């Protein structure tokens, strides 16, 4: 077995790493077949004595701990005919405590490992670019620049006391054998989380959204709700899709009973009851997305658009009081209602509301 350790961007002068190659038998028993400390960008060779699952663990000072699983199936277990090769990425930790590094890695054509990485600086607040000629390191890009097999981090200018963003991976023209190896890793100086693509849920869509993130310079939080979608749904899932998942925690609002008006009138035997409002103020509906509309003037218009849209049952409208000011006037239409959560500045309701 040949295991090539590869550092992102082929950086030099890095410290050595510890490598463990472990075989796993049919009963789940693990056995270390090789344990070695070597330099970065090195090749580890070890003979194969059995088919099955192998775990490769890599760790070291200045690196995120990495664990990859490979399956070996050889007809003959000898050095000449059974000599599989694998590439394992070495991901270095961010340079500063207030940074978060996000890395996409997958095995591309001819077994070569593809790397792309982004560093999110939570202490640096940037506004949206106003011109395509601006230096993209000083502002947040205007629209997607996704290339095939690449990914991007969509940031929001400001959310609460930190930064939130969406991670998007373009899959449309990648080979099927490449897609199944795709994984996204997010890391800071304290912890590392890795997401592998779930090919069982993939139905040939153009994009993969593995997670949303929020970082405040101390740590990061994730909204782990992976989704695949096509080009015609790009605006729905990419534009501020994740911001609503990181709203400030709000105390639950206890429902109030409709106000009863006393005394009885004209000998009535029951009190008059005021009609309860159909819209829910400061709540966001959770449901299957249908589409998202912008520059809508009021929640009444949002409700009307829901009634006029085939398949729409519920809606949520973002007012100017919402924490992300760029979302004011946005109208989210949903097919289903799976509950609601507190969201100051959002008004929600059913399709019949305002009719």
Image (spheres, rainbow, N blue to C red):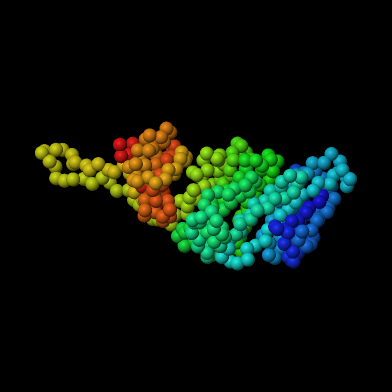
Percent across and percent down for residue 138 are: 54, 61
Relative to residue 55, is residue 190 drawn left or right? left
Residue 214 visible somewhere in the drawing: no
Q: Is residue 78 above or below residue 124?
A: above
Q: Is residue 195 above or below residue 232?
A: below
Percent across and percent down for residue 60 are: 71, 63
Residue 325 visible somewhere in the drawing: yes
Q: Residue at x 80, y 53 (%)?
A: 33
Q: How many numbered discs, if any?
A: 0
Q: Residue at x 55, y 56 (%)?
A: 133
Front residue of 148 and 237? 148
Q: Residue at x 68, y 58 (%)?
A: 91
Relative to residue 71, is residue 238 drawn left or right? left
Spot the residue most to the top: 310
Which quarter of the picture shows residue 308? top left
Percent across and percent down for residue 157 are: 48, 58
Query: Is the C terminus in the top left, top right, bottom left or bottom right quadrant?
Result: top left
Which quarter of the picture shows residue 5? bottom right
Spot the residue most to the front: 133
Q: Residue at x 57, y 51 (%)?
A: 167
Relative to residue 312, is residue 116 drawn left or right? right
Front residue of 257 and 138? 138
Spot the residue most to the left: 266
Percent across and percent down for residue 302 are: 37, 42
């Amino acid at each position: 077995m040949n295991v090539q350790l590869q550092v992102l961007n082929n950086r030099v002068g890095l410290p050595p790493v510890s490598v463990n190659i472990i075989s796993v038998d049919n009963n789940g028993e693990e056995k270390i077949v090789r344990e070695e400390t070597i330099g970065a960008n090195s090749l580890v060779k070890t003979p194969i004595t059995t088919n099955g699952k192998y775990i490769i663990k890599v760790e070291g000072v200045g690196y995120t701990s990495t664990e990859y699983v490979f399956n070996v199936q050889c007809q003959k277990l000898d050095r000449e005919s059974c000599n599989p090769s694998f590439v394992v990425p070495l991901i270095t930790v961010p340079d500063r405590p207030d940074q978060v590094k996000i890395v996409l890695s997958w095995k591309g054509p001819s077994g070569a490992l593809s790397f792309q990485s982004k560093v999110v600086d939570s202490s640096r607040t940037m506004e949206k670019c106003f011109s395509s000629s601006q230096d993209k390191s000083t502002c947040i890009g205007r629209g997607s620049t996704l290339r095939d097999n690449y990914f991007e981090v969509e940031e929001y200018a400001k959310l609460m006391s930190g930064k939130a963003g969406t991670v998007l991976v373009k899959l449309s023209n990648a080979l099927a054998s490449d897609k199944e190896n795709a994984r996204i890793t997010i890391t800071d100086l304290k912890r590392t989380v890795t997401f592998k693509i779930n090919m069982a849920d993939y139905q040939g869509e153009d994009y993969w959204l593995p997670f949303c993130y929020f970082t405040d310079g101390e740590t990061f939080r994730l909204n782990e709700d992976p989704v695949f979608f096509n080009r015609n749904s790009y605006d729905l899932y990419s534009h501020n899709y994740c911001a609503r998942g990181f709203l400030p925690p709000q105390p639950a609002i206890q429902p109030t009973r409709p106000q009863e008006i006393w005394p009885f009138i004209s000998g009535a035997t029951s009190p008059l009851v005021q009609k309860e409002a159909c819209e829910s103020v400061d709540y966001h509906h959770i449901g299957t997305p249908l589409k998202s509309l912008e520059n809508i003037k009021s929640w009444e218009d949002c409700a009307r658009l829901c009634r006029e849209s085939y398949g729409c049952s519920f809606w949520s409208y973002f007012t100017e009081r919402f924490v992300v000011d760029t979302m004011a006037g946005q109208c989210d239409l949903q097919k289903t209602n799976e509950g609601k959560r507190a969201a100051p500045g959002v008004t929600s309701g059913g399709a019949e509301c305002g009719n």
